[in-house]
Amino acid sequence: MIQVAVMGHGVVGSGVTEILLKHSEEIAKKVQEEIYIKKVLDLREFPDSPIADRFTKNFDDIINDDEIKVVVEVMGGLNPAYDFVKKCLENGKSVVTSNKELVAAKGAELLKIADENNLNFLFEASVGGGIPIIRPLNQCLAANEVREIDGILNGTTNFILAKMIKDSMSFEDALALAQQKGYAERNPAADIEGHDACRKICILASLVFGRHVYPDSVHTEGITKVTLTDVEYASAWGGVIKLIGSVKLTDGKQEIIVAPMFVSEESQLSSVDGVFNAILVKGDSTGDVVFYGKGAGKLPTASAVVADVMDCVKHQNKRRYIFWEDADSSNILPFEETKYSMYVLANADDTDSAFAAANEAFGESKKLSRTNSEKNELAFVTPVLTFADFEKAVEKFEQSGAKVITNIRIAVI
Ligand code: HSE
């Protein structure tokens, strides 16, 4: 029998204990050992839980218990999760987490501590919830040179955008609905400002390219400024707006970004609906591989956590090789050098002469039109430019008297 502890009994934590209890026999058969939940850490009371007597409010009950060999961290947030996880790894306990904030901020350090102590630190559930992606990247696709990953990594924003696209719902109403359905994070800013997707693409980039990418070195835009007008122009262009986390190698540097983008309806990512996530991995041998499924929610996420616990049990005293080095941001392509074609929405008294000015400033652009457009509205798609050149072109364009209202990148995926 192997004894485990679960820190946190929220949405994911309660799913972890539910699966471990419900599937205990099948799990024991698969790992050839019974997994016994010895302690559950939470500050709240859960008198109706079938294991109510094993709850504790005191972390010392876990860290000082030498029989506990695997600890699940599903509390979320950086503190006290970081401190607890570090102590567990320093005290002979493998750790499984779903906490993307923790892995994105402290992954390199925690992996090193795990390595030094011959323990496992696994985090399959931190990206894509129930979708297998960490293990496939680390194992099944290991023979490939992965050059690019593009993903819809946040279910809440995908749900909001899908409601805007399909039901013409405003951003505010769609966010309220996502919160009602319990999809959004406690603080919706993490979802709608792109921070959650940023943490996830940082984890994937670190894993694939072997150097820790910290979230604050990644240009991140959320979806708060996306309007129904933009949605209509995306449709006129031949696609939809999606929040994309993307990393690729450009001139030996990592080009990494999180931003809303126009995605062509021919791309596999364009049809990803509701709270679903999809991750497109471009391998040199495999070509495109897409991972699709539920990126959030109690049981999908808990399923990935429990599978990691099972992996720890099967590999006691043996490391699952998963590692990346700590690194500074010198390997990240400066944001100003990233190149995209841009959708631009502008206001101008005379839209014909403003479009002529746009062609002059940005290079030959493609005008977009929609039904019921406002009289002074001009929308177009620029050629591919570096962001530095795009900003210079905006300045030049606005000298014509036109005013840029918004701009959104065009994804090539
Ligand atoms: N708030 C996250 C999402 C939860 O919407 O995808 C899963 O990380």
Image (tube, grey):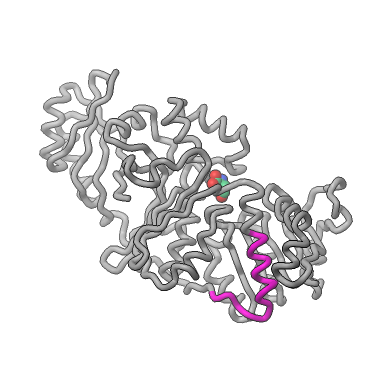
In percent of width and height, residue 412 lies at 29, 49
Q: Which image quarter holds the N terminus?
A: bottom right
Q: In the visual, does 297 lie left or right of 37?
A: left
In this figure, what is the number of numbered marks? 0
Per the image, is 319 magenta?
yes
Q: Hey, which quadrant is residue 406 in on the image?
A: top left
Q: Hey, which quadrant is residue 64 in on the image?
A: bottom right
Nearer to me, 137 or 90:
137
Q: In the visual, does 255 lie left or right of 173?
A: left
**Whether residue 111 is situated above or below residue 387 in the rendered picture:** below
Per the image, is 148 magenta?
no
In percent of width and height, residue 308 lies at 63, 65
Query: Residue drawn 51% across and 73% down?
Result: 323
Nearer to me, 389 or 165:
165
Query: Residue drawn 77% across and 66% down?
Result: 35
Nearer to me, 272 or 28:
28
In percent of width and height, residue 148 lies at 36, 60
**Whether residue 210 is situated above or below residue 371 in the rendered picture:** below
**Whether residue 384 is situated above or below residue 216 in the rendered picture:** above
Work out whether residue 195 can be spotted. Answer: no
In percent of width and height, residue 139 lies at 49, 70
**Which segment is the magenta one?**
305-321
Nearer to me, 239 or 387:
239
Q: Hey, which quadrant is residue 361 in on the image?
A: top left
